[in-house]
Image (cartoon, rainbow, N blue to C red):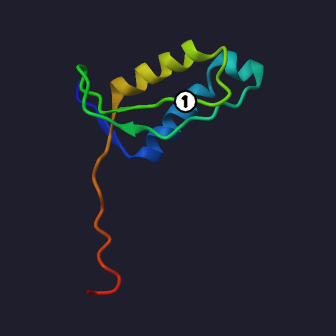
Amino acid sequence: MIRKMLNASQLQQEVNRRIHRLQEIVEDGVKIRVPRPQLQEADKTGCNWNMAHFGNAVGFERDIENVLKAVRAEYNLSIEVKDTGNPFGD
């Protein structure tokens, strides 16, 4: 399956959205801090990013891991750097 590309902010938002709609997390009223995705060499599945060190996640590690597994299967981290040009015209 070809993964869709998202930038770091979009990936962070997608993981955050999926985590905070999980029934257990909604019921407990927990707010989990989702870190920025980190670029890495593509693994054996072809995914080029990972996340670590979620905040306020004690007891929800398995749920978070399941969300990460699903999102990593769907998306890759875009590594495009937009050239904004030199504003000073050097």
Residue name at image x 63 percent, y 31 percent? 55
| Position of 78 relative to 40 (above/below) | below
Give the crowd class for mark 1: few <14, some 14-19, many >=20 residues within 10 Å. few
Q: Give the x, y percent position of residue 71.
A: 41, 27
Residue type at mark 1 is His
| Position of 58 relative to 78 (above/below) | above
Side (left or right) of 63 relative to 71 = right
Circle 1 residue: 53
Side (left or right) of 21 relative to 65 = right
Q: Give the x, y percent position of residue 45.
A: 25, 20
Residue name at image x 29 percent, y 48 percent? 79
Rendered image quadrant of residue 42: top left
| Position of 84 relative to 41 (above/below) | below
Q: Give the x, y percent position of residue 8.
A: 42, 45
Residue name at image x 49 percent, y 41 percent? 36
Rendered image quadrant of residue 62: top right
Residue name at image x 30 percent, y 33 percent? 48
Q: Give the x, y percent position of residue 84.
A: 32, 71
Q: Nearer the viewer, residue 53 or 14?
A: 53
Quadrant of the drawing holding the C terminus: bottom left
